[in-house]
């Protein structure tokens, strides 16, 4: 029988740089192994969570600590994976989802979408008790049957990709709850709307009619209070990154990458750290965070950014009239509003401008908006381009693709609580059975003595 203090054990697939795993580890879960195919993202994951100081995955001896795809895992270690069945409580992952994003053309034949099939195969092999699948909001949008959008009056509407995945999960024996969630509800200083699947295996005897998504939402107040975050309002972008401003700071040579000629502002930790900043600075031992390298903006770029800050409404994407005044066709640029959560952090560095400095954000500022703590170190190059744009995963991309650790922490806390309750319940059943066996033995002994 499992010990009552046994942590919930998980495997992370499509792990990226580790946002989802980090949050689960912070909540008390134990990582077994993780799969990520891009070397740069995996290096960040390995550095922090596999060979890290604060957290370490168990990692089976048969699995190399290298970047690999889910397809490679299934092909090369099929039998080994079957050996883990029964020891994995939770399987998590966010299959690459650009093909389902509302930001681009959604192609049903996009190979990134078909990676979901590999994820379903892994579920069938490991048969974990719980599943967590995270994706973009567009995951629940219907594919068009032709080139144009579907008519609302269309009699036979095709299912969404999320509908299809739910049907598959139910076929594998899982109770499925799913829907949209705003990460800002759990203390993330960012209006990041994501689509979550939270599932439990039906044969556990605990799933019943429970809706894990509603259960997660029901933990919000308690989770925020536990982390000393406000419950009556959202965390703002200013609270998240104000200590990282460059104004009035000495500019030093940036040395945390191979690229030369870049600067970063000298960092001085605030004398008083409260609320969200205290949470981000936890376990940093007063050290400055990495990834604070500033972009080398040209003079004309700085002037353009000043004009954008003057003309555009903070916290909202450019309107048509604002774009016309600026003479640009780019509509995704948003100036941060210091008193509101940030818009969704993406993989494109110039999508967000600072609220009071004429520049894009640093990787660390984006990481703060994603709720990565300062001790978490990002590895590899900052950006990439040209023919490598679709192949590599530099720091800005790692951060933009990540699941906010705070949201993952909330999910892990909720599932861990259920896990421990189930263990206690199991322990009580065993105890009652043992008492019954003892009484039978006593009767036999009494009978033989008469």
Image: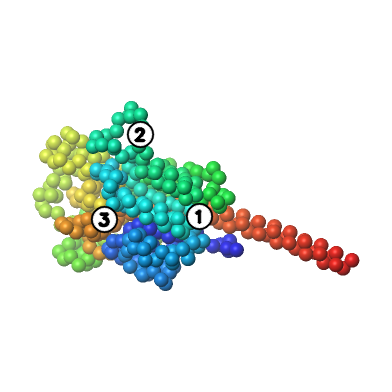
Judge whether residue 296 can be spotted in this image. yes
Q: Nearer the viewer, mark 3 or mark 1?
A: 1
Residue ID at (16%, 66%): 260
Disc 3 from disc 1: Cα separation: 31 Å
Q: Quadrant of residue 164?
A: top left
Indicate the position of residue 28 as horizontal and vertical percent values: 48, 60
The outermost residue toward the top is 153
Indicate the position of residue 32 as horizontal and vertical percent values: 44, 64
Indicate the position of residue 185 as horizontal and vertical percent values: 40, 44
Residue ID at (17%, 34%): 321
Disc 2 from disc 1: Cα separation: 33 Å
Q: How is the image coloured?
A: rainbow
Q: Nearer the viewer, mark 2 or mark 3?
A: 2
Q: Nearer the viewer, mark 2 or mark 1?
A: 2
Q: Which sits earlier in the primary sequence, circle 2 or circle 1?
A: 1
User: Where does label 2 land, which residue?
Assistant: 157
The outermost residue toward the left is 300
Mark 2 surroundings within 10 Å by alpha-carbon count, few (fewer than 14), some (14 through 19), many (20 or more): some
Give 428 or 238, whichever is nearer the viewer. Answer: 428
Q: Quadrant of residue 380?
A: bottom left
Q: Which mark is residue 129?
A: 1
Does dot 3 land on a helix, a strand or a loop?
helix
Judge whether residue 345 can be spotted in this image. no
Residue ID at (53%, 49%): 202
Residue ID at (69%, 59%): 433
Measured along the vertical axis of the image, is residue 34 above or below residue 406?
below
Disc 2 from disc 3: Cα separation: 35 Å
User: Where does label 3 land, which residue?
Assistant: 397
């Amino acid at each position: 029988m499992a010990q009552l203090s046994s942590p919930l054990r998980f495997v992370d697939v499509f792990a990226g740089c580790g946002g989802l795993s980090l949050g689960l580890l912070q909540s008390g879960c134990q990582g077994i192994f993780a799969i990520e195919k891009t070397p740069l993202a995996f290096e960040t994951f390995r550095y922090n969570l596999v060979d890290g100081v604060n957290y370490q995955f168990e990692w089976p001896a048969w699995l190399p600590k290298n970047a690999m795809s889910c397809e490679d895992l299934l092909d090369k270690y099929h039998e080994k994976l079957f050996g883990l069945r029964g020891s994995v409580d939770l399987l998590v992952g966010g299959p690459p989802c650009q093909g389902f994003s509302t930001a681009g053309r959604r192609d049903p034949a996009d190979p990134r979408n078909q990676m979901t099939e590999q994820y379903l195969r892994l579920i069938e092999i490991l048969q974990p008790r719980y599943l967590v699948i995270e994706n973009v909001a567009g995951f629940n949008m219907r594919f068009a049957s032709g080139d144009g959008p579907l008519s609302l009056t269309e009699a036979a509407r095709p299912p969404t990709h999320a509908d299809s995945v739910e049907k598959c999960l139910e076929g594998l024996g899982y109770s499925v709850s799913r829907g949209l969630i705003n990460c800002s509800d759990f203390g993330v200083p960012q209006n990041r709307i994501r689509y979550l699947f939270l599932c439990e295996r039906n044969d556990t005897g605990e799933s019943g009619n429970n809706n894990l998504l509603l259960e997660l939402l029901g933990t919000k107040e308690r989770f925020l209070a536990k982390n000393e975050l406000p419950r009556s309002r959202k965390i703002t972008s200013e609270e998240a990154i104000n200590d990282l401003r460059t104004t009035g700071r000495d500019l030093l040579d940036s040395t945390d990458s191979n690229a030369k000629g870049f600067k970063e502002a000298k960092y001085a930790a605030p004398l008083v750290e409260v609320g969200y900043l205290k949470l981000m600075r936890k376990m940093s031992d007063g050290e400055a965070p990495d990834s604070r390298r500033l972009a080398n903006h040209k003079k004309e770029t700085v002037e353009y950014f000043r004009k954008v800050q003057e003309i555009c409404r903070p916290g909202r994407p450019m309107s048509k009239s604002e774009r016309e005044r600026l003479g640009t066709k780019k509509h995704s640029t948003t100036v941060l509003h210091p008193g509101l959560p940030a818009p969704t952090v993406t993989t494109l560095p110039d999508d967000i401008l600072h609220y009071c400095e004429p520049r894009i954000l640093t990787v660390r500022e984006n990481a703060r908006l994603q709720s990565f703590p300062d001790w978490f170190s990002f590895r590899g190059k900052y950006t990439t381009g040209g023919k490598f744009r679709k192949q590599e995963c530099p720091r800005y991309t790692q951060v933009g693709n990540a699941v906010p650790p705070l949201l993952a922490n909330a999910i892990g806390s909720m599932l861990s609580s259920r896990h421990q309750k189930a263990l206690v319940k199991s322990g009580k059943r065993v105890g009652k059975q043992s008492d019954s066996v003892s009484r039978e033995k006593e009767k036999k002994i009494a009978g033989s003595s008469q």
